[in-house]
Image: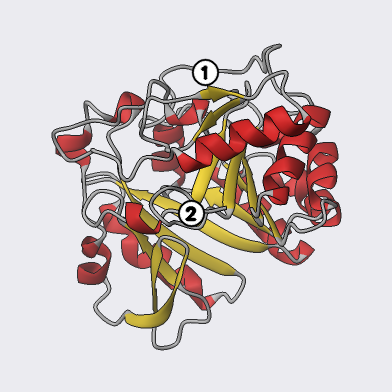
Amino acid sequence: MIDQFGREIRYLRLSVTEACNLRCLYCTPHMVSDLGTDLLSASEIEEIVQTAVGLGLTKVRVTGGEPLMRADILDICERIGRIEGLTELCMTTNGMLLAAYAKGLKKAGVDRVNVSLDSLDADRFHALTRGGDLEAVLHGINASVQAGLLVKLNVVLMKGINDGEIAEFVAMTQNPGVQVRFIELMPIGVSADSLPERFLSADTVLDACPTLEPVSDTDGVAQLYRLPDGLATVGLIRPMSRHFCTHCNRIRVTADGKLKPCLHAAEEVSLRGLSGSALEKTLRDGIWGKPSQHHMDLDTPSESTRGMHQIGG
């Protein structure tokens, strides 16, 4: 499916809940443990993904909130995983519940998990997440590798918080099953106010680890690098310092059934109650109308009316 600017849209990020068992400082202002009653059902999710794949989308990432908090998450993944034409099914998780789910996710058809992990120091991790258990997350990462899932660690760069851990994260790519991606902090939701004092360019990673060598290919929006003895890659994602909107190939669907053609735009289109040709037309129109770019910078916050936990990482 091609949008009005000639971009080929292949990627759907699908939130299945706004609830999360952590409340990271830059993401969730308060604990959201109630899954709520306004969630898309497993069958509604299946129909939306089936229709999107019919339009040419080939990759789905299941997100939240924390997607593993849904009791029917394995059923959802199984339904999506068996859709003909889908070539990649991934999940973003905070990893707290991952150890118990890794084998089941692999069996359900999930290819990869992206684990949000912003510190390797137990006390700092606990403070950043306001209650997280680093040992549980590391156990989940190991269980995922053993289950045959590819693991990517998503590290949000924050000045004065985790910039001293960059080299330690990069060293983890000496394990072939673990890729590390550093993401620039964005002014969306609760992070907008703290951005000026916390923002770090992804180039900080190259300064901290000068032996990183560029890799010729890219992984989605990530520019890839590798240590001379590295077995996996380091990715730099620069939504602030180097806009990649001209190459954006994704749309998003929220847990309550709203299509967001752009993460940082206010526009949302309801998919609730639609099926068949009506659902297909709404998805087509939403993709065609995807904005050319976001308008964020260090002084201008995201135009989204929702925080990240309400949209999906």
Q: How far from the left and from the top, in percent, is residue 150? A: 65, 65
- The answer to whether residue 282 is left or right of residue 75 is left
- The answer to whether residue 273 is left or right of residue 213 is right
Q: How far from the left and from the top, in percent, is residue 160? A: 21, 45
Q: Determine the image quadrant of residue 195.
A: top left
Say the numbered circle drawn on residue 31. Answer: 1
- The answer to whether residue 136 is left or right of residue 230 is right
**Crowding at label 1, few (<14), some or many (≥20) Cα neighbours within 10 Å?**
few
Q: Is residue 171 above or below residue 221?
A: below
Callouts 1 and 2 close, C-beta under 8 Å: no
Q: Determine the image quadrant of residue 207.
A: bottom left
- Whether residue 313 is visible, yes or no, is no
- Name the foreground residue: 273 vs 236: 273
| Residue lying at 68% horizontally and 13% vertically, measured from the top left | 38
Q: How far from the left and from the top, in percent, is residue 39? A: 69, 20
- Name the foreground residue: 238 vs 168: 238
Q: Amino acid at mark 1?
A: Met
- Identify the residue under disc 2: 249
Q: How many marks?
A: 2
Q: Nearer the viewer, mark 1 or mark 2?
A: 2
| Residue lying at 30% horizontally and 44% vertically, measured from the top left | 293
Q: Amino acid at mark 2?
A: Asn
Q: CA distance from mark 1 to mark 2?
A: 31 Å
Say the numbered circle drawn on residue 90. Answer: none
**Crowding at label 2, few (<14), some or many (≥20) Cα neighbours within 10 Å?**
many
| Residue lying at 70% horizontally and 28% vertically, measured from the top left | 278
